[in-house]
Image (spheres, coloured by chain):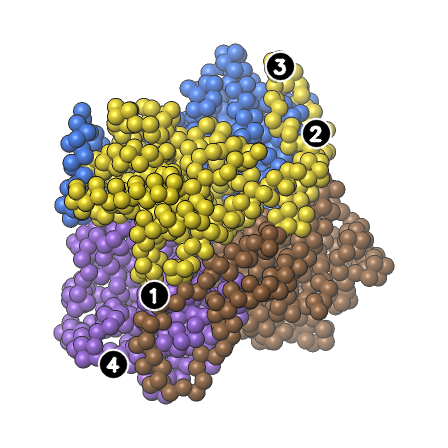
Chain colours: A purple, B brown, C blue, D yellow
Amino acid sequence: MPTEPRFTFGLWTVGNPGRDPFGGPTRAEVDPVDSVHKLAELGAWGVSLHDDDLIPWGVSAAERDRIVARFKQALDATGMGVGMATTNLFGHPAFKDGAFTSNDRKVRRAAIGKAMNFIDRAAELNAEVYVFWGGREGTEAGIAKDPRDALERYREAIDTLGDYVHDQGYNLRFAMEPKPNEPRGDIFLPTIGHALHFIEMLKRPEMVGVNPEVAHDTMAGLSFHHGVGQALWAGKLFHIDLNGQRIGRYDQDFRFGAEDLKEAFLLVRLLERAGYSGPLHFDAHAYRNENAEGVWDFASGCMSTYRSLAERARHFDSLPEVQEALEAASTPELGLASVDGDEAESLKSEAWELDALAERGYYNERLDQLLVDVLLGVR
Amino acid sequence: MPTEPRFTFGLWTVGNPGRDPFGGPTRAEVDPVDSVHKLAELGAWGVSLHDDDLIPWGVSAAERDRIVARFKQALDATGMGVGMATTNLFGHPAFKDGAFTSNDRKVRRAAIGKAMNFIDRAAELNAEVYVFWGGREGTEAGIAKDPRDALERYREAIDTLGDYVHDQGYNLRFAMEPKPNEPRGDIFLPTIGHALHFIEMLKRPEMVGVNPEVAHDTMAGLSFHHGVGQALWAGKLFHIDLNGQRIGRYDQDFRFGAEDLKEAFLLVRLLERAGYSGPLHFDAHAYRNENAEGVWDFASGCMSTYRSLAERARHFDSLPEVQEALEAASTPELGLASVDGDEAESLKSEAWELDALAERGYYNERLDQLLVDVLLGVR
Amino acid sequence: MPTEPRFTFGLWTVGNPGRDPFGGPTRAEVDPVDSVHKLAELGAWGVSLHDDDLIPWGVSAAERDRIVARFKQALDATGMGVGMATTNLFGHPAFKDGAFTSNDRKVRRAAIGKAMNFIDRAAELNAEVYVFWGGREGTEAGIAKDPRDALERYREAIDTLGDYVHDQGYNLRFAMEPKPNEPRGDIFLPTIGHALHFIEMLKRPEMVGVNPEVAHDTMAGLSFHHGVGQALWAGKLFHIDLNGQRIGRYDQDFRFGAEDLKEAFLLVRLLERAGYSGPLHFDAHAYRNENAEGVWDFASGCMSTYRSLAERARHFDSLPEVQEALEAASTPELGLASVDGDEAESLKSEAWELDALAERGYYNERLDQLLVDVLLGVR
Amino acid sequence: MPTEPRFTFGLWTVGNPGRDPFGGPTRAEVDPVDSVHKLAELGAWGVSLHDDDLIPWGVSAAERDRIVARFKQALDATGMGVGMATTNLFGHPAFKDGAFTSNDRKVRRAAIGKAMNFIDRAAELNAEVYVFWGGREGTEAGIAKDPRDALERYREAIDTLGDYVHDQGYNLRFAMEPKPNEPRGDIFLPTIGHALHFIEMLKRPEMVGVNPEVAHDTMAGLSFHHGVGQALWAGKLFHIDLNGQRIGRYDQDFRFGAEDLKEAFLLVRLLERAGYSGPLHFDAHAYRNENAEGVWDFASGCMSTYRSLAERARHFDSLPEVQEALEAASTPELGLASVDGDEAESLKSEAWELDALAERGYYNERLDQLLVDVLLGVR
């Protein structure tokens, strides 16, 4: 039996006012408390947030407490959870050269401190995961940073924060969110792979996973479900950001399923088969030509497309012709070990049998066409 | 004192006959022995090779020995070394669905055996590194392979071969070569990051590094020198493939320096500063509209551009105005630890100082313009 | 009533033996006569061909006639038509620097002559359209060609061939096929737009249109249905090549519908609404891991997905909620003239009313979600 | 003798405060009058501007006149010219669904009126060219606009404005500026080619040319100098926007020469050889991590790199080895007509000579390496 998906939305997603590099806002900002209520109504499981989404930069300590209390009240009233919390380390102009990897040591320290401050709140809000998206950790002028120094500073920051969480006894895991570029010309930890490797270099690799985002690896033209597959294979898929994006474009953050339905299908099928049970987080926003009403069309669409794809995936796997086509493609055979205590000599001699092995076909056209037919609802 | 760079060329690079998807060869294949002699003459340090570059598929065992002996004679005569050796696991039609990750178990076993066979030769030829480029390890129809199964089979193959090298007592390290796509729609281990992570999942991570190629990460639009920086940071740069490529294109394998001179400069400067002493391998080929003569123009150009860039990098770093600009950008400050036994509370309170930290500039325009001036030889 | 679509396949598509830059053929070449019979069986309307697809380069004049006669017999026997014919100006090594724009004048002349020779055959075969795809018209080293000279030579060639068709009294229209790159680093006439403009510069613009290909404009990340829209708007869609492709990759030529179902839907809907009645030509090939059997799976899949999408498009437009959503988006209002004999002063004063015009939304999320729902067969 | 280049900067370029999608401004906006003075000091020839750059939206008519008078005074005082003027049809939220192609007819009318209002000012300021960049003319949800309707409305708007300029007797030419995407998912007239074709469809094609921008066609991975070459070939290069950009990224607008020096060299050489004498307009801005000081480093760098490249181009062409290499590549031969009153039969028979024509090489490696050597200042 499939479990009920736990959908979450960032406060900044439904709250996005439609500003872009060429124009100002097209709709009003939304009060986080209103978002909580509205999302609960639409069937979401929870929300996620940056510190600055909830607590405007510069308010007094008393005001901060008041805001958080009011927000918790809304969560309690609606039964909504907090899927993840994170620090905004990109909006403030001081982060213009980076946060954890700014060339200015004082900025790096302030960034670590800002994260600590909100980690306390995240624990207070029972957030499941604390995400690090290093949007400003990069360069336009590569000459200005030795990438080895930058990665060393990045590691130092995450290790320091890992120690902090450990020392405080918080029940909080970290998730690194990769992105190749924008807002920086090139960002450190550009893909899922780079982030997975970085985690292995940390002091506490066991408490850190990844938070891949459809749009981010897709910008670089990488197969998103392959990347998620590598994270799952390594036991490192701690959170996921769902949205839509065309390859080789600015960060579009479209509604989930708005682009590349086949890849979205492969992703949902993989998540469902792998038993991923973390938050399904929509990090996206309504098209800028929408007014306030369109925001909720957008939010509903994200969830309904996920459900449709999950249903299509189950239907696909239930079809006898699909099972036959998977067999014809030898797909299940990829799950079998290739070697099993073999002598090297026997493997070496099998190498000379390649000519005979070249004859067969793999029937991928048939299998992929079945997928297209299922996607289009004609089968 | 900079050491003399050790330039190598693949036999398949200068031997490339100019075939492409839309047309046949435009020049004759080159006898590997002739390549060794000609490259020695032009000042290369060595060559690299796939099994099938040297030993045509299907010849008898006796003929294989004869060919290898003749090749070793050419190496001895010229003093040329073997930078790396590798298995061709992509050319034979049996690998059409993958080699180590083919859905057909027999193909996977034959692939492992084929690699073992040439690992023996690599040891005999004193190759420094044994490379694995999994060009066929991927999909066009993602539905045909669970990426977790594919990675598990990939790991199994490398672990099996690592054991083999260990058991034979060969002095040989492995290097994984990532590529995002082509000839498969999507290739597993698409970037430097994915390969670095994969290595950490292996049984013998210490004997495995990466062999990044300019063209490959550039196809995906990633900063190549950032990726190489991550490999160097992890101590995993075992080999490198130099060439030229435009973002978002078919695999072009142009002459080193033919595209993106600034990135090439940043790469060479990084390699020189990091003291990378492995082979500098040109995995490229002459434009298809060249005849035999143009091949050697191509080879000379690769080496001379590397030397020019290394000289430009030393000159750049010798300029007082550059040192001043690096200081103004706080570049050296990125080498300093951000925290040093600090109390969490002090870091947390420093977070509130961001407004003051936003005032300064980083003078990256000035620094980058100095780089452009040096590149253009006007400074 | 929708007319029956006229599906065609290039002889080189179903005949593609699976060769790619990294490996040789994986299946046998197919006799063109067998392709005609098999495609007729599967429900295609016709075929298309390059000169060299039918008549191997270098055979005698008598053999050429014999081959063509046998081919015509197959067409007659099956009732299959010839959607388009074209010259292979890319395969022969002499075209390595270009055909109509080779720097070698003798090559340019031979290219024009080769086209004339097959234009005669095209007329004999009652081909509807004669296509020019200038795959070799470009550069890797931009310095080697002044683009103005190249375009002038390109124009000269098409004008010469246009005169030839006119003088011979053939009932044959030309279609220019754009492509951004591959096999050249950069190709002249890289997009639909460049080709449409080039046509306006010709001596006989009225006899020349475009043959856009999904894969080609998609490689450059352009919206294919927007490009086709511009061609239709100008009355210049003379032929179309349907297939599947990811952005920013090598030329993949996947089965139609295998990538980006939403864009494929928008394209099919546009073609159907515009009453395009030319050939629907699948310029694609089976995945390389298929053997002979998979080729026909591939061909059937192309046609069935086109039919499915056309049906989905009709269904979409039949839904009352879609009509409402189009109204809410003001889509029909884009068909109305903006001005109608207005005084400039009245338009100028209306400019000051923008603030009030900013309030409304366009309900594109709702409309696009309806499209996704229809695509997924859940509505 | 080369003429002195006429460098211009948009008021919005040096005035750019460093806002991006993920963060607010990092430096103060600059008073247009201060920009005029500072740019004059640095050696620029003039400025360019949108209506809203100079005249904030919403000020009174009297205030508008006062602002323009003060600006003209600054131009007079410094001798600076106005290279081009244009309408901001993207910033106001009313343009969220397009300006000339908004689905809302009232918005389309207001857009035309807004352009008319500033065309009057452009004439008053003696602007040479009036540019149309249709940044909002596009879609995220393709289903919301029939591209044929959109192009028809686009044409109607430009024709209406062309009539207006004609009727007023203004000495003003139009230039269309293409861009593939951002801020819209897909923009109509995405490339130089599409814009050149669109112009041929207008009522007054003779008064309309293109304003290509390095960043825009580069985003789509197209060769910028090929595109500019097509515009020059057609006599349609009325203005040009110079900057730096990586392929397949968000719109970066980097300093001219900051990316892809070889392409920048080919562009400058082409412009200089073609005798382009219009404004050389830097549509770029300082990196966001710069403060006010860095803006002028940026501006100086743009101009100095153009000058360096122009000098390098002259030097390149002055080298005897370059002239020899161009001859070896048959580059001058591309300037010769291919046919000259030939009989078709003679061309047809020359086609059979291809085998012999395949032998020669084109020496592009040698030629391109000379270019690299000149670029690096080592030759």
Which quadrant would residue C60 be assigned to in this image? top right
Name the quarter where the C terminus of chain B is drawn.
bottom right
Q: Name the residue under label 2.
A: D357
- Distance from Cα at disc 1 to Cα at disc 3: 69 Å
Image check: A116 left or right of D6?
A: left
Q: What element carries label 1?
A: helix
Which residue is at the front of the view, D174 or B70? D174
Q: Is mark 4 on a helix, strand or loop?
A: helix
Q: Mark 2 and mark 3 in contact (Cβ < 8 Å)?
A: no
Disc 4 residue crowd, few under 14, some 14–19, many 20+, Cα 10 Å? few
Which residue is at the front of the view, A263 or C365? C365
Q: Mark 4 points at which residue?
A: A124
Q: Name the N-terminal-most of marks 3 and 2.
A: 3
- Distance from Cα at disc 1 to Cα at disc 2: 62 Å
What residue lies at 20% left-to-right and 72% top-to-bottom?
A80
Q: Mark 3 and mark 1 in contact (Cβ < 8 Å)?
A: no
What residue lies at 69% left-to-right and 43% top-to-bottom?
D366
- Distance from Cα at disc 4 to Cα at disc 3: 86 Å
Type of amino acid under label 2: Leu
Q: Is mark 3 on a helix, strand or loop?
A: loop
The answer as to whether the residues below labels 1 and 3 share one chain is no
Q: Mark 1, mark 2: which one is toward the viewer?
A: 1
